[in-house]
Amino acid sequence: MTPSPVFLPLRELAALVRTRRVSPVALAEEFLERLERFGPRYNAVVTLTRDRALAEARRAEAEIAAGGWRGPLHGIPYGAKDLLATAGGIPTSWGAAPLRAQTFDVDATVIGRLQAAGAVLVAKLAMVELAGGGGYRQPRASFTGPGRSPWHEDAWSGGSSSGSASAVAAGLVPFALGSETWGSIVSPAANCGVSGLRPTLGRISRHGAMALSWSLDKIGPLGLTADDCGLVLEAIAGPDPLDPSAQDRPFRHEAKDPLDRRFRFGVLRAAVDAADADVRARFEEATEVLRTIGTLEDVTLPSLPYDAITRTILFAEAASALEGLVESGALAGLTAPEDRYTLYARDAILAKDYLKALRLRAVVAREADRLLAGLDAVVAPGRFAVAGRLDETFRSAFGGTVVDPTGAIGNAAGLPAVAVPDGFGERGLPTSLQFMGRAWGEGTILAAARAYQARTDWHRRHPAVG
Amino acid sequence: MTHPEAASEVDLLFALVRARYGHRLTPEELEGVRTSLAGIVDGVRALRAVPLENADGPLLPPLPDAPGAP
């Protein structure tokens, strides 16, 4: 009997497709049906791309039948955060009501790369409006409604890649693309109990993606496992003449990692201490697993205003990147009240202060690399708390109400991180473990996360859906 | 308690924002702008407190390679 494709890791799903036990068209139809049926429950979907999906699936089916299997993503459905441009009249809303009818003539480079790999785009997924660039402080900052975690009807799916995380967690897509400027992949992955990879800055082209902060924005995959994230990364990484920031650093994901590989982990205690008690408890349990695959040591970094550095860069660049919306007055049409005025305040950041943040970022990058050069990864909770309630004003690092040294350092220095589920905390909601590595060190952190997932089963636990 | 210099800076920046965009914003939104500015000023004051050397330049994204350049 052919197993259900829902909640199958990509390698297993790919084997079914390659051996023609599952048809790409049937797969597309099944996930389109799940998106249509369950997507509204989680406010996960902006647009179903049914016509495009079925056309891509039919093409994949014909190619595979003719012996032209392209690789592990061929015929596999996926969803994309709705800040990635899609041609063919499919709207790209950036999560913002004033832009809900916005269209582009071309696909974002990452969408084109996945099409070249044979993947099938089934949906544009919900997100926080303007990727959080308006300064939102609560989950209702999206015109598609507050993203709900599939683990609890009153728990936020996280942001800003809200639908990318909840759709994967609920088995509405096998994998998804999200983006992170500061926390927008790692945090929703944690809230929804899935795996999420923030790549090195410059690893993946951002052509066709909404810009929030040119020097911080990264596009990355969310999936059920770290291995899934690696497979997707391999398909989308690489240089792009349309995005000069994308570097010629091809990434090759290992089919298997050596079982006896040993790792050296560092624990940034300040990041652990900033977490809630339930999250800390799960982290300490996770470290016991990590001791079976390597060593752990407490590490420190110089005392610097890490959060303020990253926040100032993000705020200043967002005010410029979103200048058109600021100057036109279109911010008044945003959903969250705070998003209608916060960008005006950021207009007043002085150039000298922005440059001081960029100068300090060089110090952060140097110190972080010095630390990571002697380690395989820094490990820390993926998020400081489990998902909050839908009506809560939340604590956030970029709002200045909680410190996030790992996120601030990792994003300022452009470092990769992969978050994987590591248990459950308050209200039965998922908690998360992140591995942050040296620039261009995705192979190492993915190997460590895969080794952790080979010894745990948190990634095989799924919420009750339907 | 907010430092007097910080409060003064917030007042000046708030006047700038109000002059440029005040016609679009409600009194409640303007108060939100002031609160946001207070957070921004707190942050940049923390940056200003860190000494750097003349040679400590900014970390910027890499420039594109120029095809055919030496």
Image: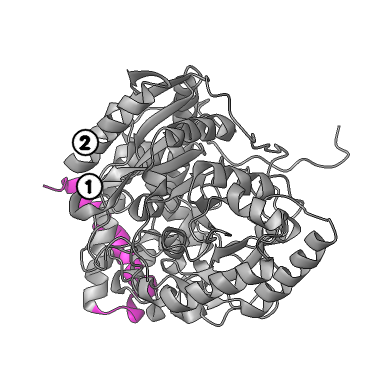
Q: Is label 2 in contact with label 1 (beta carbons under 8 Å)?
A: yes
A325, above or below A260, in the image: below
Q: Chain of mark 1?
A: A
Q: Which residues are magenta?
A: B1-26
Give the numbered dot on residue A425: 1
Camera sees residue A303: no
Residue type at mark 1: give it: Gly
Give the numbered dot on residue A281: 2
Inter-mark Cα distance, 2 to 1: 9 Å
A96, above or below A23, in the image: below
Residue in view at x 58 percent, y 32 percent = A443
Q: Quadrant of the N terminus of chain A?
A: bottom right
Give the numbered dot on residue A135: none
Which type of secondary structure does the marked residue at label 2 adopt? helix
Q: Quadrant of the C terminus of chain A?
A: bottom left
Residue in view at x 88 percent, y 39 percent = B68
Q: Earlier in the sequence, mark 2 or mark 1?
A: 2
A126, above or below A195, in the image: below
Q: Chain of mark 2?
A: A
Where residue A291 sits, quadrant-wise, is top left
In the image, are marks 2 and 1 on the same chain? Answer: yes
Whole-percent x and y of residue A253? 64, 37
Residue type at mark 2: give it: Ala
Residue, far left: B1
Which type of secondary structure does the marked residue at label 1 adopt? loop
Q: Is residue A399 left or right of residue A276?
A: right
